[in-house]
Image (cartoon, coloured by chain):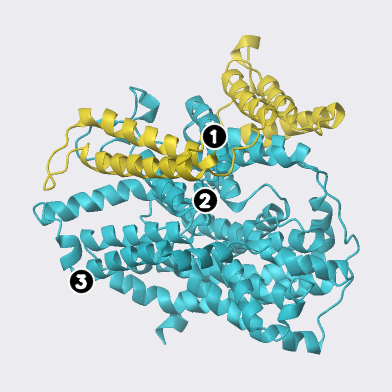
Chain colours: A cyan, B yellow
Amino acid sequence: MEILDNLALGMSTALSFTNLAYCLVGVLFGTLVGVLPGLGPVATIAMLLPATFGLPPVSALIMLSGIYYGAQYGGSTTAILVNLPGESSSVVTALDGYKMALKGQAGKALATAALASFFAGTVSTVILALFAPPLAALALKFGPAEYFSLMVMGLVASVVLAHGSLLKAIGMVLLGLLLGLVGTDVNSGIPRYTFDTPELADGINFVIVAMGVFGVGEIIRNLETESSRTLIASKVTGLWPNKEDFKRIAAPTIRGTLLGSALGILPGGGAMLASFAAYSLEKKVSRNAKEFGHGAIEGVAAPEAANNAGAQTSFIPMLTLGIPSNPVMALMIGALIIQGIQPGPAIMTEQPALFWGIIASMWIGNLFLVVLNLPLVGLWAKLITVPYQLLYPAILVFCSIGVFSLNNSIYDVYLMAGFGLVGYILLKLDCEPAPMLLGFIIGPMLEEYMRRALLLSRGDYSVFVTRPISGVMLFVAVAALVVVLLPSIRHKRDEAFQEE
Amino acid sequence: MKLAFRSSKDLWSGLIFLGVGLAAVGIGQDYGMGTANRMGPAYFPTVLGTLLAVIGLVIAARALLKGGEEVGMLSWRGMIAVLGAVVIFAALIQPAGLFVALPLLILVSALGSTLFKPVPAILLAIGMTIFSSLVFIKGLGVPLRNIGIWFGG
């Protein structure tokens, strides 16, 4: 079977000593980031990107992906132990996980989270291996019109799935698309929106935007609501789930995994949406629905499985189509481009070792996380108590030096401060920054594909609708927007994001 | 109909979108529109800017009619300390060097916290400066100096 050969190739790549080491470093860093509230995977990956320039592409990507799914594990640890979700994707885990910890079942909750995540990680690795090749084969047939429509569909999905106001999310995407156009126009050589600043002639590096908004902007926002953290469940006793518990979590874990895998593939989806959706679903179908919110073990298993599955399947559109489904994937694309690899359907045939190596490393990384994190939980619990007032100045050091080292340019550091201010203001106005970053990355590609498609059709716009695949994707995009704008669905959507 | 002239979050977001959209269209006019067949550099930004301005207008209008959540207090202390620290760092890192710019980055930004205590902040500044000098300058070879040209470095 071809898939077995492919996975064998991936394993042999991922199991080399260097790559194992980078995988381990990645998941440890990820857990650390997940544990520390106020520091997310986007800012961390942006900070570490410059350090990966010297690595071989496979090692760089293996480490960066380790950070992403490692952060899901770490986030659940803080959610359970201190009721402070380290990541937005573990917000719902805190609901029941923390209640379990209060009942003296912290160990059981942590083990459930880890096992559910591991199960989900394993299944979604297989899903990734099964679904990526046919999707890439399909994508090879895409022309510029199809790519344009695919990107529009992706941006619409990211808007529909963003929480908060729909109009604001659309505005943020457009803002991002416009920001992405800053710099020299590739077709005419005319500098656009550079205000005669030579530093802007090559455009704004997306790492600066990510660090400014998700790093600096977040810090300022966090400073509004400071409080000292206390560890409630200081002693984590090794309460392994018993047979009864395993029976209770089996079905929710499987449902969470499947739901998470499906939502992860959608643009704008990924880990956070998956965990929210899985929790809502369990609350509806579970026999123990009444226990939810009071320490139901299903309420830990399902969202934890879903967020890990979602984190992993969100690699599918990135690796096969070259289109990011969330800001983390946008950074991964940036990392690949810096390495001289254009993400897209050709990766799988041109760089099979890279492609399958990343997939195999995810399963290995998940194994690392289970084996290492349960024994290390005491250490992570201690890290939670690092006071934020000592943490954020250190984060600023990494951001500032990291941004400088991108192009050895002081201008970029000022620019990061500027985006920090912009990010803070947007956060204050309840404008979600994630769709903006997606728009920023996609902007130049979208323009290029639109240009090419219209050039081929001699300026005839109907090309986007008359080509069947392109037409279907645009129809889906429009339909999704219309459906969400319907009042009844809109109400449901608001509800889904309001799980507290 | 009563208009709610309160500075709601939605009103401000709408106005920002409207402003950026109009600016993008306005500045973009110099770049040359072209035709749909051969899109000029102004074509795509004009489309985006127009859409953004329209959306901004709708958001702002709805906010005026329906009101909305108020913006709430800005965290001036955090904002000034954090952004100020980064700007000071950027201004001083080349002339004065890492040994001056980095402790200032830490200490100034640390002032943004209401839980600021001098002793831990100073210890953190010393620790991070040594760490950054060793890891970034010596280890990773980032072209920065420990002691800047002002001090003969």
Q: Which chain contains the residue that carries disc 2?
A: A
Element marked by disc 3: helix
Residue A474: percent from the left, percent from the top? 28, 64
- Along the horizontal axis of the image, is A497 left or right of A384? left
Q: Are the numbered discs 1 and 2 placed on the same chain, yes or no?
A: no
Q: In front: B32, or B100?
A: B32
Q: In front: A361, or A263?
A: A263
- Along the horizontal axis of the image, is A466 left or right of A10? left
Element marked by disc 2: loop
Q: CA distance from mark 1 to mark 2?
A: 50 Å
The quadrant where residue B93 appears = top right
Do callouts 2 and 3 mark residues in contact (Cβ within 8 Å)?
A: no
Element marked by disc 1: loop
The quadrant where residue A389 appears = top right
- Determine the residue positioned at 27% across, 29% down: B26
Q: Which residue is mark 2?
A: A55
Q: Is residue A201 placed above or below A312 in the rendered structure?
A: above
Q: Amino acid at mark 2?
A: Leu
Q: Which chain contains the residue that carries disc 3?
A: A
Q: Quadrant of the C terminus of chain A?
A: bottom right
Q: Quadrant of the N terminus of chain A?
A: bottom left
Q: Determine crowd level at label 1: few under 14, some 14-19, many 20+ residues with C-alpha closer than 10 A.
A: some
Closer to the eye: label 2 or 3? 3
Q: Which residue is mark 3?
A: A468
Q: Which mark is residue B7?
A: 1
Q: CA distance from mark 2 to mark 3?
A: 42 Å
Q: Which mark is residue A75?
A: none
